[in-house]
Amino acid sequence: MSPLLFLTVLIFLPTAVALVLTLVPGKGNDDGIRYATLATTIAVLLMTLAMAFGWTDVAFETGESSMQHLTSVPWIPTFRIDYLLGTDGISFPLIVLTTAISALAMAASWSITKHVKAYCILFLLLETGMLGVFLALDFFLFYVFWEVMLLPMYFLIGVWGGPRKEYAAIKFFLYTLLGSVLMLVAILMLYFASDLRTLDPSQLIATGVVSASLTEGDGAAAAEAILSAAEPQHTFNMLAMQQMGQAGLFSKSLQMWAFVLLFIGFAIKVPSVPLHTWLPDAHVEAPTPISMILAGVLLKMGGYGIIRICYPICPEGGYELAMAVCTIGVVSMVYGAFAALAQTDFKRMVAYSSVSHMGYVVLGLGVWSANWQTDYVTGYWKFGMNGAMFQMIAHGISSAGMFFMVGVIYDRVHHRNLNEFGGLFRKMPVYSGMAFGIFFAGLGLPALCGFIGEAFVLFGTWKYSITLAVIAAAVVILTAAYILWALQRVYLGADYRGPHAEGIAPITAREFSIAAPLLALAILFGVLPSLLLDYMAPSVNQTVDTLAEWTEANKPRPDSPAKAENKQADGSLATPDAQAVSLVPIGNEVSP
Amino acid sequence: MLLLANLLTEPVGAAHYMVVGAVLFVCGVVCMATKRNTLGILMGVELVLNGANVNLIALGSPYLRTDSAHLGLDGQLMAMFVIVLAAAEAAVALAIVLNFYNNAGTVDVDRADQLKG
Amino acid sequence: MSAATLLPLLLCVAWLLPLVSFVVICVGYSLPQLAGRQVSYAASRWGGHIAISAIAGSFVLSWFALLFVWLPTHGYTAGDLAHTAGGLAQHNNPAPIYYAGDWYTLANFDGLRLTIGYYIDTLTLVMFAMVSLVSLLVHIYATGYMHDELDDVTDHEVAMSNGEYLHRRGRYHRFFQYLSLFSFSMLGLVIAGNLAMVFVFWELVGICSYFLIGFYFERPTASTAANKAFIVNRIGDFGFLVGLMALWSSLGTFHFGDTQAVDESRPGIFSQLRTAANDYALVVPESMQTEALRGSEGDGPRAGYWLLCVAGVGIFCGCIGKSAQFPLHVWLPDAMEGPTPVSALVHSATMVAAGVYLVGRAYPILTPEVLLVIAVVGCITLALAATIAMTAVDIKRVLAYSTISQLGYMMLSLGLGGWAAGLFHLITHAFFKGLLFMCSGSVIHAVHTNDIRLMGGLRHKMPITAYTMLVGCLAIIGAGIPMLSIGLSGYYSKDAIIEHAWSFTNSNPQWRYQLLLIVPLVGAVLTAFYMFRLWFMVFTGAPRDHHRYDHAHESPRSMTTPLIVLAILGVAIGWNFPFTDLSVTSLLEQATPIGTQATATGLLIADLTIPDEHLSHVDAIRIPAGLSAVAAALLGVLLAAAVYLWRWFDAEELKQAFRPAYSLLWHKWWFDEIYDWTLVKPTLFVGHVVAAFDRHVIDRAVHLLAALGRGLAAVVDRVFDKSLVDGSVDAMATGFWNFGKSLHHLQTGRLRSYIVFIVVGTLATFAVVSVLWKYAIAG
């Protein structure tokens, strides 16, 4: 199977099934529709697992750091917009996470009884959107998928949500839309500043601008056509933009602006304080499976965007604003933890814990410790970035699990007031035991997945900023406090204090089979993080190395002898004319 | 006048038939415009149709049109068609009239003004 | 097989066996529950058997490793420098014999490696032997103590909302499940080959402690105590993390020893800080100076030294939490909510000693300044806890405070440079404190109360418990005959600590350092006083509560056997192995940390000298120190006897006479209240402020923005849409309407007029078309 076909089927299989479902009469077929949807999500999961374990020829190579299965088809040739797909160690674990959480969330959707057909269709569209975001490498395509994912989510919260669902859905939608509008502005800024002529032919092929599937002669001709064009050749190709950003094509002010706009867009998604208030409301109102998806996958898109887009394309902006990014991360961690401490709604507490945990991700991505003060060592930054990536997966597992655990009890007693639980350990021992496991994963207990991410991030942070590292380390106290306090109020004690005590029943086989994989993964990744790192580390390290090289070349030690020359180089890069001068020779090499 | 003079001097041809047809047509139109009685109007309609028929026959006749531009059988077919149409129209119109009479107790078309804006 | 491969293998298996037991019990006993059935009590009993087999395996393997692998390979005299009187080393000592390696790697980026590995020296082996032995005994003891859990339990401490007492199924197997997990975690902590792994197991023992304290989770006090224990520990772990990050960022490794096979370029922490080139003295390495300076100009060595001090104090913070040192000692007394075997194993013998173990393990990292901090904290703790123990009436709380106090002694000793003395006390303390707790458990089992005011005269009813406990009391106060150097285990270890404090004050004659000798001596008096107060109140005199007294009985064999074993060990563990020099001390000294056998002076506090440990063995110190220690203990015993045995003074009158002091001690120096007001409440307050900020500021701002947006939309709607766009459309519509209106007169409804219109219209059309034809189109 060609990568193009495989990846396309991967993305659009849910949509195709959704289209078929529209033709099925909705009345009386609820279970059939549910099973069909579940089967689809499982099929998609199996496809990604097949990639992961090499059961197919479109397999993911674990040692490979560059983009794999890069494949493109022209989509809107006028603006050089391609249907460009590919995956690497940064996106692939998130793709598997997406398909896995989708399958589990669909299995958890049996409690949805209202408009099952519509729900399943939207659910499948959502999965397409999510997979598309992680697979798309064309900025425009990325943006399209980003929006595709937004709409089903809006309806899933707005129709199947709790009492204040409309408020929550609108809030979610507007927040995210604000972010994507800013992102669009940044995309267009970068598009019009980009120029493919500054790349050399090998880069054009490596970035997928010229399709690698062309024969050698055709490829060279296509590259030649781009390079010899008289007018600037704009592109939406992210990989090409990365090359240009690191080569200094984008001016400093452009990079700063683009970085800020993109970062705000992604920070809303992460979400970072102070752009986080949509999250508690959305989670509280969303039905359980949607909360699982929201926390398990959607939040990761923010972190993914930062590592895939913000830093590589705008290194200058990232370097200058690293402290701000890290500070936002730490503030989120502290703020989320404090807020979680004060909540009385179980789901709201878990939502704030997400804010706190995702702060680690932002912090880990931001610790630009390869600078002249540290003699450009990269190891610590690698710990930070790998920790952040690991934390994304770990949080995907643990937070989805936590929301599911809340959902299980909510289905029984129909309330979430932390002060009106108690004694569940006695009545639902297996459920409570699993809940303890998953909540401890969230708490960052060693041997569970949350610990690895948090510890890696902390071990990476000190090298960048001692103050931030110390504050971040202090969050472990607050995390323990709010999680243990909640566990005590919900599970421990002798008596259940709330309403609907008669509804409390042991965990069902279906619920168990959703919680068990999450718990098993939490333990597995906590004990053997290399299982995950084998997939992600090469690409993440590659990103770090590239950025570190960039730093070494562009941000020298202030008192070094090279200072004067570099100052000049810096100055000259800022003017567009000089850019052209410095970049033209590259083009000339291939067009003699 | 000059036209009429020409007609009188020439041998009978299509133009003469057309004059007859035009007279019939105008009679029919005047009849339609002046009669208040529905049946009278219907008669006017018949006159108009037959005026047209005369023209069709005349223009379709190879004897009357010496040039090759005659309609041939087309004209006569068309005339047959109009006759059939006229018969059908008469049947429908008479049914309407009958109904109208049943409802209004008269066949005066000026009384049929319920749809007036 | 050589020792280098055999030792890690043996200890690894010993370490993993309890994990296997945990997994088997945890999963195996959950399956029936998943199927909706209860675990039968017969099956539940098997949980205990599984756990005991596992820990017995660990015990056998650990002792085998020590006795039959280590001793034949390395002997024990090599490290036995303690008693060679003139053996004051002119040079610092190199690294002890150890085996270090990695089992697997968690992550490796640019040579920065996080691994799961081992570091095995005699300290590891002795700790393994001690932990597995005490753990085994506690397991056996627990089969008796937890016997109630093999049937439905009615918990008289928990009243349900309907007024009845809680009635629940027993959880015998769950208890052993947690014990197994704890044994695994504790052994993992001891074998850990690097600081990160220590931290991992540090947290795991913490969570086991959480589960075990909260074993009776239906009791609100138990679950609160469990939370308190974990959260207070996390405060210490925060410091631990800071220390870890500081070391990691400057040295690039967490490994204690050198695992050169894997990583040539980056030796372990110890070798980096104490290189052979510097005669194993603590010298801040280049990388640490760079890290401390971070590109700024400055005094590199001094800045690096500061960083090292930060790292040392940070790691010690973890130890403060785990070992319940001042100011984080508040969790340990509350932790007595757990079942007594837990108190014996986790909260006296092993886990709380982990802090001391870590200080001992990380000893080469610690600068003299950090050591002073450790000593001062230990000193404050031992005094503080001893004073509180004097007034406590809960038998287990007395022992808990006693534990805190003894841990303070250990810390003090380590802080003053008495490495072997401190760790020796750790080992002896594990045995006699384990013994004391188990005895208290036996008493509680018999009289069903913790309050010593309701006991009395019990030695007639339960002689084994009474006299084994007496042995424990004598051991803890350090009873012995100084001139003959014969005594119970505590005598040797406590003596060594006092000797070392004496030696320290000799080296540091400044008056402020004298307190570090005076306080432990006073503490020794207090220790003797509260221990014998406890023993006299429980076992002598007339029964105070006849009902309880009448129902009291000696505990079953499964409980008394461990007591007897521990009592023997409590007496003898300090002795040499018959006819040899082999003793715990000589074994421990084989692991003397690199570069610590020389007098060290401070850099930041210039007048601070940490004396060489061997200086304390000279007779000029040993004899007066030993005499004063025994005198102090004797004084304490006499005081206790005067009040509680012979009743020369009335306890109530004393209480009245010293009312303010008594009240302070009774309320545990008000620590809980102070923390509640200064830490807990403000934290919760901040939490509420933040939550309110979220709702009232950020959300309100968002709503304001939304309202602004809608307002703007309304204005746009009114001004632009309504008047301009709608206006023009409306005007057009109105125009057409009016035009149509004016035309409606043509609609006469008269068929005849329509015909006229048609005719006129047709003619007009023809006319127009013909004109147009002529002039416009054809023309």
Image: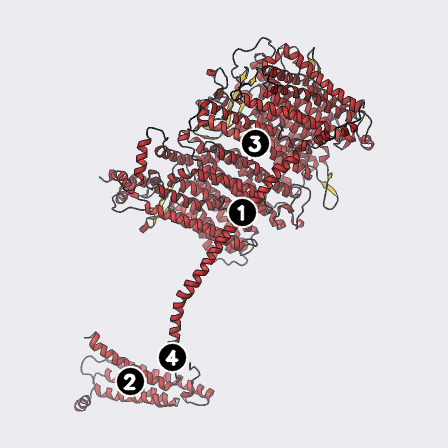
Front one among A227 and C694: C694
> Going from the N terminus, do you reach mark 1 or mark 3 first?
3
Task: Write the residue at 37% across / 76% down.
Answer: C739
| Horizontal and vertical percent position of residue C221 | 68, 37
Residues at discs 1 and 4 in contact (Cβ within 8 Å):
no
Of tags 2 and 3, the one toward the viewer is: 3
Of tags 2 and 4, the one toward the viewer is: 4
Figure quadrant of residue A190: top left
Report which residue position mark 3 lands on: C237
Asked whether the residues under marks 1 and 3 belong to the same chain, the reply is yes
| Horizontal and vertical percent position of residue C69 | 57, 17
Task: Write the residue at 49% across / 34% down.
Answer: A467
Report which residue position mark 4 lands on: C742
Residues at discs 2 and 3 in contact (Cβ within 8 Å):
no
Report which residue position mark 1 lands on: C694
Would you say A270 lies left or right of C431 here? left
Q: Which mark is residue B53?
A: 2
Asked whether the residues under marks 4 and 3 belong to the same chain, the reply is yes
Residue C489 visible? yes
Report how far apart the C-alphas of labels 1 and 2 lie in the structure.
91 Å
Q: Where the C terminus of chain C falls, by quadrant?
A: bottom left
Task: Write the residue at 71% across / 35% down.
Answer: C149
